[in-house]
Image (cartoon, rainbow, N blue to C red):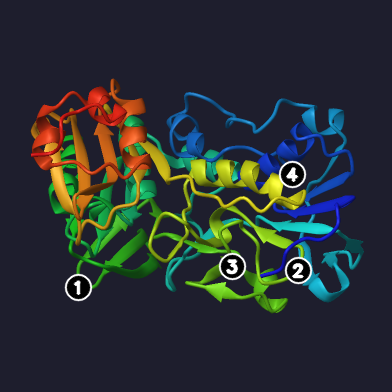
Amino acid sequence: MSTPQHPPRRILIVGAGLAGASAAAALREQGFDGDVTVFGEQSHDPYELPPLSKGVLLGERDEPDWVRRAGYWDDHGITLRRDTAVTALEPARHEIVDADGTAHGYDRLLLATGSRPRVPRGFDGPGVYTLRTLDDALALREKLTDGARVVIVGAGWIGCEVASAARARGARVTMVDPVPLPLRQVLGDQVAAVFRDLHADHGVALRLGVGATGTEVRHDGRTVLLDDGGELPADLVVVGVGALPRTELAEAAGLDLAAGAVATDAALRTSAPEVYAAGDIAAHDHPRHEGRVRVEHWSNAKEQGSHVAGNLLGGHDAYSADPYFFSDQYDLGCEYRGLADPARDELVLRGDPATREFLAFWLRDGRITAALNVNSWDHGDALTALVGTRARVSAQQLTEADLDTLASGDAPPRP
C-alpha cells in the first residue's frame, strides 16, 4: 500500500458520521491549516449514534450527542457539505464526483461512508423500520406507544436495545431470531443466557431458534411470517439483523476489499494512493488481533477517525486500540473491551451472573482477549489495562485477586 510523499493542502472526507467528523476536527487540532471538506448525505450536523437506541428512543431527549457544538465547523474553517452524495471516486485523477456531477480534487482522501442496515428480502413497505439515523429514531419512537404490537427481527445489540425502549414505552414486544440466545455470537451461551432472561423478565416474548422469512399486509394489518409456519401480528416491525459497509465508491474505484469491507493496512491506508478508510467500512489489518478486524461500534469510529488524521498529514502510525462498546437495557448496563471468540476462548466469571452484577473474562492460551463488566463500575481502568496488555493470568487470579493489583503487574505469578 502506498506511502504519502508530500504534505497535503486539500483533504476531502467522504462521510459526515462520527469517523469522518472526528478526523476533520483532529486535523485542525493537529494544526493543519489547509482545506478540509466533509461530504455528508444527511441534513444534520455530525452526531454520535449510541443515544439513538437509548435516550432518543426512550423519549428522554430529542437530540443525539453532536460531535462538536453548533458552529464549530464554520468557526474552524471546515466546509461541511450537508445533503451531498458522492457518486464516484477516481484515484488516478485524485478526484471525487458529487451527485451534481461536480469534480473535487484532493491531496488526501478519507473514506468514512459507514454502513447501512441490512434488510432481508420480504421486509419492506410501511410499518417496517430500521434504526440507523436520527430521523429513523424519531420516526420509530412515534410508533412505540402503549399497547403497540412490536415484532423485532434480530436479537443482537440493536434488537435488544430497541426491545428495552419499546417495553419502557408500554409496547408489547416479540423478539425473533434463528439463534437460540440473544447476543450468542459475541458473548457465548452462558453470558447470553443472562440477556435472554433479562428480556423475558421484562415481558418480551422470545421466539428464539425461529427465523422470520418476511411480512405480509392483510386486511387486518401486517403479519410477520416465521420459518416454522407460525405468524405474528404486528403494528410495526423493527429489523435489526446487522449492517452492510457502504463500499460502493471503493469497489467501483477498484480498491481492494476484504470481508465485504475496504481493506486497509495497520495505518488505515487503502490500496489506492493517498486514500484512507476509517470506521465501519474499514477491514483493518490490526497489529494486535488475528486477521483483519472490522468493528461497527461507536468508539471505533471515533478513535479511528481521530487517529487517521495524523496519517493523512503524513504519519504512518498503526491503529492498535482495542474494540470497546457499551449497552444499556432496562436496569442493566454493561461495557465490553477487547475481541473474544466465545467458541474458542475460555470463559471466566467473577461474581454470579444470576445477580446481573458480575465480570466476565475470556482467555486464550492463558491471556485475556476480552472483558465484560455488567452493572459493575469499579474496575474500568483495570479491565482496560488487562485487556490492553493481553495479561497472562489464571482463572483463579481473575476470580480471587485484586484486579487493580493484577492490572499493575504487581500480582504474584500465576499458580
- Residue type indicated by callout 2: Pro
For label 1, the residue is 229
What residue do we see at 19% from left, 38% from top? 198
Query: Earlier along the polypeptide chain: callout 2 or callout 3?
Result: 3
- Location of the C terminus by quadrant is top left
Q: Secondary structure at mark 2?
A: loop
In terms of image quadrants, where is residue 102?
bottom right
Q: Secondary structure at mark 3?
A: strand
Q: Secondary structure at mark 4?
A: loop
Between the C-alphas of marks 2 and 3, the distance is 14 Å
For label 3, the residue is 262
What residue do we see at 37% from left, 67% from top? 215
- Residue type indicated by callout 4: Ser
Q: Is residue 215 left or right of residue 255?
A: left
Callout 4: 10 Å neighbours few (<14), some, many (20+)? few
Q: Is residue 262 above or below residue 181?
A: below
> Of discs 4 and 1, which sits in the foreground?
4
Q: Is residue 368 left or right of residue 49?
A: left
Between the C-alphas of marks 1 and 2, the distance is 53 Å
For label 4, the residue is 43
Between the C-alphas of marks 4 and 1, the distance is 43 Å
Callout 3: 10 Å neighbours few (<14), some, many (20+)? many
> Of discs 4 and 3, which sits in the foreground?
3
Between the C-alphas of marks 4 and 2, the distance is 30 Å
What residue do we see at 80% from left, 72% from top? 91
Query: Earlier along the polypeptide chain: callout 1 or callout 3?
Result: 1
For label 2, the residue is 273
Query: Earlier along the polypeptide chain: callout 4 or callout 2?
Result: 4
Cβ–Cβ under 8 Å for marks 4 and 1: no
Cβ–Cβ under 8 Å for marks 1 and 3: no
- Location of the N terminus by quadrant is bottom right
